[in-house]
Amino acid sequence: MKRRDDEWVSLLIVIGATLLVAFGLIALVGSNLMVAVSSFLRGIFGSSYAMSEVLVRATPLMLAALGVSIGFKTGFTNLGAEGQLYMGAIAITATALVFPGLPPIVMIPLVILVGFAAGGAWALVPGFLKARFSISEVIMTIMLNYVAINLVGILVRTGLKDPAYPYPMSPILPESANFMQLLPPTRIHAGLVMALLMVIAVHLLVFRSRLGFEMRAVGLNGRACHCSGIQVNRATILSAIAGGGLAGLAGVSEIAGLHHRLIEGISPGFGYVAIIVALLGKNHPFGIVFASIGIAALQIGSMAMQRTAGVPTSIASIVMGALILFLVIRDSRQSIAILEGV
Amino acid sequence: MPVLEMKDICKSFFGTYANRDVCLEVREGEIHALLGENGAGKTTLMNILYGMYQKDAGSITIDGHEIVFKSPKDAIARQIGMVHQHFTLVPTLTVQQNITLGLRDSGYPFSRERARCEHIDRLSDSYGLKTHSRALVKNLSVGEMQRVEILKLLYRKAKILILDEPTAVLTPQESDHLFAMFKQLKAEGCSIIVITHHIQEVLDHCDRVTVLRDGCSISTVETKGIDAKQLSTMMIGRELVPVARERQNHHMDAPVLELVDFGFKRNGGKVGSVNLSLRQSEILGIAGVDGNGQKELLETLMGLRDHEKGKMVCCQQDISNASTAERRLVGIGYISDDRHRDSLVLDMGIAENLMLRPARSTAATQGHMVNKQCMLEQATRIVKEFSIKSHGLQEPMRFLSGGNQQKLVLAREFIGSPKIIIAFQPTRGLDIGATEFVHNQLLAMRSAGCATLLVSTNLEEILLLSDRIAVIHEGSIMDTIENKAVDITRIGLLMAGVRTEGAAR
């Protein structure tokens, strides 16, 4: 009982400290606090369109964070969701442009599969190297982000460039590759449905399947799994592929649901924010649903705050960073306490 | 007058008492034993004295002055020194550097290495410790490392020396040397506190003994005029029932497990090689000092390390190159000496830890999914059968006591009646009750036809359970003898690597 209370109290302290940082920063840039807060809130709840924008932004975050969380559960620190997302985006663009005549019923499943495979393959590289040669996946996944991002830069200027325009971008994809708009005029698209289905799929995989059990066990104590005859390498590689694939789907969903063409910078760091979302959601699929909506709201709200109150959106990133920092401090304090008790 | 007096010491961790009104009084120039089971609070009490933990209540008096230690630094300043069970040495530094670590020479910042080395060598010689001050610690044997730890205390001029389970890593002969040195220190006026759970050691070498049980001090007595039985009753609160091992006639069947010139890699680039055979319904004990290749041998047997050469044959099947999963499916169970690292996922519950087996040998796996109901039923059955105490099947293993954790490991390894059990120090860190339980379970498996390879550094355990005893030294088997009227001296010599023809029988 007492432990429960402590948890709530410490959570309140974390929230309070985060708000203090946010208010301090707003005051620092010389904006009116009341105006800033009200524009922040109105930016999120002010209209049904504002609220729909939150969900639009939450979609790629949710998918990428699910991917990150599977890796984390297995002890595979996947910081490469950004790169995997871009690989998914390249895959859908290339596929749809190569086979423009396919009917939607074939096209949609095909681009989803190809996008998943591309993201998965991108994560397989560090996954395999970690499993086989115990090379740190942390550095490799980050480095592969740069490779993927700049690969997009090359492709939109060469192979996938739209010849009709001088700008670095691909042609508009055939309509058969578009995700359905769910509630026009809002921009909510079928990618949200896909993300929610993936939440359920990940939950089944991680908490109900034998493979998921092995993944979790490997993440908690790989050595014991090894001694018990569980194939640690297999679990690591499969979780890397699944995680990379989900991040790839985030790229697919962004292209098929919003942009309909490949451009540079389709992701304003979704892959990195996804790490924060996964941490906030405690690597649990249901937690990630709430965390992704929460972080999306923070970002959307801060944009409104910039428009109305002149507070730079960078504050949202700082607040996110501070929040994670406080949460990590809180968790470590608890783990220290637990360790001392043993 | 006592040098040290600890009065009514209380210390609790998260509401559980580790020490409750414990009193300890140590006189000048005595060897004082602190006797108790694992978890009785011996180490906690000494860590309080050494300044590692802060007491909740009570008082500590040294030479008549009440003192409060905020850290081990204060304790060292008061000439108190402690050798922990797990040594605190830097392997890449020399003996001299380890001993003087954190101290300042008179000529600081210029070091006077030669003078220090000479001082240490002189000190070492005067106690017959035979340690070379310029040797690298990583090249030392465990016994030598312990001597370095003791030298560290002597160099700091400790008057009260605390040693946590010092004989656990020594051969019987080395232990005798250690206590001989303690007698010399005692004559010089030092007081020595020895933490132990070996009753015989207390009776043979110590002057007085304080018995702890469940965090309370039971009593302090002179070792003269008390016998082992009385001490064990004080220690565990009841009389100890010796494990009954009835003889079994071994059919001369083909061996269940055969190791032919089985070579394995040892830490530090060395190679070990053994020939052994194990029959049905037999417990083969492997005795030896810790660090003679036992762990590497067993891990190679389980497929956790690559083997070097030779053959491992299990039931006419050559499994020298099989994976861990394949070996387990053939019917080999493994009880590691480090259950936290090798056997359990501490943040998972009982039910899930029981599933930590190759997928094909888990009843609760159906296709690719886990049958939760089946998993919980199995767990419920096992918890009952092995009387594992917990707050539910989902409670993380972390919160179970060591004994209950080990029971679960045993239960899991016994699922599907394995042909061979490889047990490495299966009672390490367990209290007497749990140790009895483990011993009885191993004997029950033996009656059921299971062949057991029992590796332990605890000679008593080997003598108690084994049908045959093999002695391992530097990665090879010195000799294998029937466990009938065994000459302990001979085993001790074999453990030290001495093969004597005459000394036997």
Image (spheres, coloured by chain):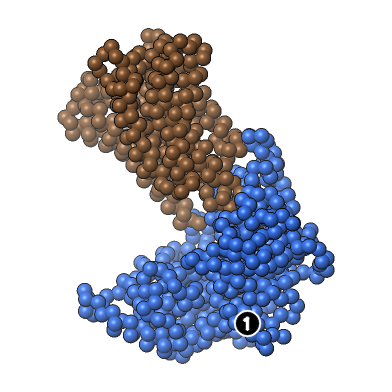
Chain colours: A brown, B blue
Using the image, determine if residue B427 lies above or below residue A191: below
Q: Nearer the viewer, residue A187 or A102?
A: A102
Residue A14 seen by the camera:
no
Q: Nearer the viewer, residue A234 or B484?
A: A234
Amino acid on which disc 1 is placed: Arg
Q: Residue at x 72, y 65 (%)?
A: B278
| Residue A228: image location, x then y, percent | 61, 50
Q: Nearer the viewer, residue A282 or A191?
A: A191
Q: Residue at x 54, y 69 (%)?
A: B291
Residue farthest toward the left in the current orientation of the protein:
A30
Residue A77, by quadrant, is top left
Image quarter (top left, top right, bottom left or bottom right) of the C terminus of chain B: bottom right
| Residue B141: image location, x then y, percent | 49, 74
| Residue A314: image location, x then y, percent | 25, 30
- Which residue corresponds to mark 1? B499
Q: Label 1 crowding class (10 Å Cα cut-off): few <14, some 14-19, many 20+?
A: some
**A42 on left or right of A182:** left
**A18 on left or right of B282:** left
Chain of the residue that carries numbered disc 1 in the rendered image: B
**B247 on left or right of B224:** right
Using the image, determine if residue A64 lies above or below residue B263: above
**B390 on left or right of A63:** right
Residue B116, by quadrant, is bottom left
